[in-house]
Structure formats: structure tokens, C-alpha cells
Image (cartoon, helix red, strand yellow):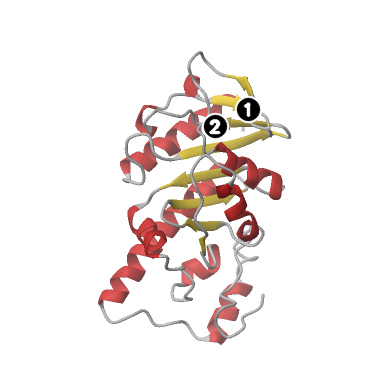
Amino acid sequence: MKYQEIKEQICDVCNKMWLLGWVAANDGNVSVKVSDNEILATPTGISKSFITPEKLVLIDLDGNILEAEEGYRPSSEIKMHLCCYKEREDVKAVLHAHPPTATGFAVAHVHMDNYVMIEDILTLGSVPVTPYGTPSTEEVPNAIRPYLQEHDAMLLENHGALTVGADLLTAYYRMETLELWAKIELNAHLLGGAKEISRPNIDKLIGMREKYGVTGRHPGYKKYNNIQE
């Protein structure tokens, strides 16, 4: 994908996040790795509904600004994004938002680690709640680092959600899937509780990931039944 097309795609994803109610005011941030040492990121202090290509900032893997219009700089949360890129070579895009239902799980400190939906077994795997970290500090990268090695989606304790992907659309779809799963699990709880899929069927679904071209790191629910993949 061409550089300008990536910029436009970032803006499109930002607008979708805002329309879906995943972000308010200046919440959330998006980044895409465009070369070995270059990252396009959304600027701080701007609503995702107002993001345009020229407002995006180009930084290196150490967070230094390489290119930006006057007055624009990356979010202080960029440290979290840089951690993702440094820890995993397969990650080319990072998305952070506050989808209401999934963030409710993060605020309640409830891991999304039940095997109850076919689509989530295939595409997302378990979603842990990572330890609390003060925004803009190294606490957040340090909190997600151990979980990042195995997970493509995480709930940030009392904060929001984070997804990564081999490209921006993959990271976006994972956030979309996460929020829908959270809504369904909450509804199931109101109806008496979700019922887990049987172990043999879990194994079948995990085995189908390659067939469907699902990539990334999304392990099973090791908390339950000592499931190993």
C-alpha cells in the first residue's frame, strides 16, 4: 500500500472509531509501521473525528519526530505503541481505544477468557486484563510487555483496550470483534451466564485458524482445562 493510502486508511479508521463511540474528545490513538524505523501516528489533542492525513506525524522507533506539521506531536501513549513494535516484528499496526463494553470489563478487572464464541476462538483468543499503568509513563509498556508475547488484544486495567495486527485493518477488526464479544458476553451474563464450548469443539476451531488464514498470537484459555495449542 502506498504511503498516502496508508495515511487515508488511518483517517478512515479514526473516523470509524469515533462513529462507533469507541472514543470521545481526544481519546484513543492509532499507529502504523511504514518502514523498519518509521511509524505514522495520530497526533495528541485532536478528536479522531477531525484527523486528516496532513495532521499525522511520522516518528522513529525511539519516538523522535521525523516529520510533522507545526504544532503537532504524537500522543504521550506512543510509548505503548513503540513497545508493541519493538517486542514483535510481526506487528505493523497498533490501535488503542475505549470501546464502552470491553472497557467495562477492563474497569471491572474481568478477563475475557471464556471459550464461548466460535468467532473469537478462531480470530482473537483470550483477552487478559493487564496491570494498571499510569498513562504517558513507562508503566504502561511494562504492564503490557509480558502479555504482548502471546496476545493480539488486551484490556488495559481501568483504562481501555489495545489491539495489534500485521496491518491496520487487522488491528481494527480485532477491536471490533473484541467489543462485540464483550457486548454478547454481558448479555449472556444477564441471561444466566455464558456456556462454554466443549473441549473437542474448541480443538477443532483452533485447528481451523490456518485454513482461514488467521495469523497472530491468540492462545487458548490456559486458565481452563490446561488447554495448550
Q: Disc 1 residue type?
A: Ile
Residue 144 image offset from top left, x and y in percent:
58, 54
Specify the quadrant of the image occupied by residue 207.
bottom right
Q: Residue at x 32, y 69 (%)?
A: 186
Label 1 crowd bin: few (<14), some (14–19), many (20+), radius 10 Å: many
Q: Residue at x 55, y 24 (%)?
A: 57
Cα distance between the residues tagged 1 and 2: 8 Å
Q: Is residue 88 visible?
A: no
Q: In the rendering, which numbered label is found on residue 41?
A: 2
Question: What kind of element bears circle 1?
Answer: strand
Q: Are marks 1 and 2 in contact (CB under 8 Å)?
A: yes
Q: Nearer the viewer, residue 213 or 42?
A: 42
**Quadrant of the rendering where the C terminus is positioned:** bottom right
Q: Earlier in the sequence, mark 1 or mark 2?
A: 2
Q: Is residue 136 visible?
A: yes
Q: Is residue 198 found left or right of 47 in the rendered image?
A: right
Residue 7 image offset from top left, x and y in percent:
53, 28
Question: What kind of element bears circle 2?
Answer: strand
Q: Nearer the viewer, residue 182 or 106?
A: 106
Q: In the rendering, which numbered label is found on residue 59?
A: 1
